[in-house]
Image (cartoon, grey):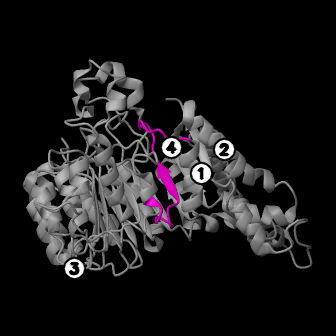
Amino acid sequence: MFELPELLDMVLSLLSIQDLARCALVNKQWCDSATPLLWRTISGLSSIQRKALQRTVLEEILRIQEHQEHHVRVEDAEQHQWPGQSPIKGEVNAEWKFSSCRPSLWRFAPWIRNLDNPQFIFYALKNTTKMDNVLELLHYFLKQCTNVRTLTLDIVVPSKVFYQVCLIIADSLAPNLRELSLLGPRNGSCFGMSSRWYLYMVSRCSIKLEKLTIYNDPYPGYIGDVVSKTLPIVEVTFPGLKELILDHCWSKDELSMWEWFWKGCGNVERLELRACRANRAHDLADRIRVWLPKVNSIVIKNTVHRKAVAPLLSACVGGWKDIRTHAALDPMSCKALATQCGTLEVLEVMTISAFSSKTLRRVLLSSPRLNTLITIDDKWCRRLRSPYIEANEFIDLIPLSNSLHPWASEKSLKVLKTRITRIPRPDVYKVLAGQEHFDTLTETYAGEGRYIQKRVHERLARLTNLEELCLGQATMATVFLESVYDEGEGEDYQYDCLEMTLESGLDQLKDLKNLCVLDVQRMEQRIGLKEAQWMTQYWPKLREIRGLCDDGDNLTAAEWLWKHYPMVKVKLASR
């Protein structure tokens, strides 16, 4: 079927494990190509898979032991045989028989590239009469895995046995790794790991290490073990290390132990912080400023204390190009973010603050390199109050003038994912009359809503290189509305938003020739047949529309697109 081996390899690389297993049964050529892919990743083994791997390793070791014992018997027989006596029957070709029938582990283990938690592979395996120590099984298995590049090591309970396992892993795998993840106990566990253990594992890695993750409980009740004090640490540098993922895994007394590590990370470009206490933020910022001169991308998780964000955002000497934060921005953080506008290319902010609208407007105003602004989570998580931009802030009129303020990001912005709110919608208010938390939908004068919508569209029209425009978001909050609804804060459905009709100003966006994705999920929009026809006429690269509903004008537009433009992906949702 596939005459070119490269074509077969490319197709097989896209298949699931189950499909690969079926392909391996087709013929010898397919089996030879599919088997390495089946062995490429050893992760999340089921009990059946773990037992099969245990049996494979055990049988191979027993086979080797049997061969060695047999070889000894042959030598003894040769030493004690009388002159002229023939060798023992069947023993002459024993060496040839063993070498010509190598076990599967010897053939396939070098194909393993990704390995998760090898310490659990032989966990709870009963000792056999010929194998008294399961650590020997692990050691033999890892010795065969000569090409592992990615290793994840989860720590459950530190113990002497666990340290012995770590010594085996450090000796067998660490020198060849490109990615290493050391994941310690979390969530208030009574166990923790000392810095010396982490540094020992890191010091055993190759200079070719490219990505390092260290994750430990910031408040452990128990730190390490006396065994860790004897671990030898060799101070090395990591010229190939580009990505560093940390939480605050050391105590105040252990800061000095990490100095050599920071000195060896001079080529790190991306830094991700999963946890950091406010009183340690300045120490960490100093290390970023001194020892990470090439870092330009930072990810701040929501477990980082909000008062720690400002020092971290101010720590980059050359300026951040990529900032992704799930932590709330306080006034100091917003001020620190504003100083990065000159170099900023990607900004992702996921947690609301009182200053989100003004801060986002300032970023759009002052960032000439900004190509991506995201405040909407694509993972469909339960996020009830994501950041937004108020319509007046987004329009950004020049004082005492009726013209829009020019933004530095107008030509560079390609991806805009945010909510634009506070737009009067009297058409919606008539339906929802009497609900006090929708007062923003009323107009102070007749026609205010349409006027604001046209000015918002006028601002969007200036983003001529825009490829993705996402103004809506579908979240799991809809499942919990009855229990969390409180004065509108729990409502993720947008009413004070653009109605996205030609009458409201959509026709001003005819110059967005590069637009590929339009997202209006859970928005009170009124896209109909004429809007769909207009989009296909003026947006030649349009490939996906998200958020059309399965009733009314939305359904009519979707049916027309399915019939006349099947290349445009349209997935309906219930209103």
Looking at the image, is 495 positioned above or below residue 377? above
Quadrant of the rendered image containing residue 289: bottom left
Q: Are marks 1 and 2 in contact (CB under 8 Å)?
A: yes
Q: Where 255 falls versus 375 (above or below)?
A: below
Report the front residue among 265 and 193: 265
Which residue is labeled 2 in the image? Answer: 560
Dot 2 alpha-carbon crowd within 10 angstroms: few under 14, some 14 to 19, many 20 or more: some
Secondary structure type for disc 3: loop
- Left or right: 492 with respect to 25? left
Amino acid type indicated by mark 2 = Trp
| Image location (x, y in percent) of residue 145 | 57, 66
Q: Give the labeled residue for mark 4.
A: 123
Q: Residue at x 45, y 41 (%)?
A: 521
Mark 3 and mark 1 lie on one chain; the one further toward the N terminus is 3
Indicate the amino acid at tag 1. Answer: Gln
The residue at 24%/35% (across/down) is 443
**Hey, what amino acid is under mark 3?**
Pro
The residue identified by callout 1 is 533
Q: Which mark is residue 353?
A: none
Q: Which residue carries the number 3 mark?
A: 293
Tag in front: 2 or 4: 2
Left or right of 450, for residue 551: right
Quadrant location, the N terminus: bottom right
Q: Where does the magenta region start and end?
A: 509-528
Closer to the eye: label 4 or 1: 1
Callout 1: few (<14), some (14-19), or many (20+) C-alpha neighbours within 10 Å? some
| Residue 340: percent from left, percent from top | 19, 69
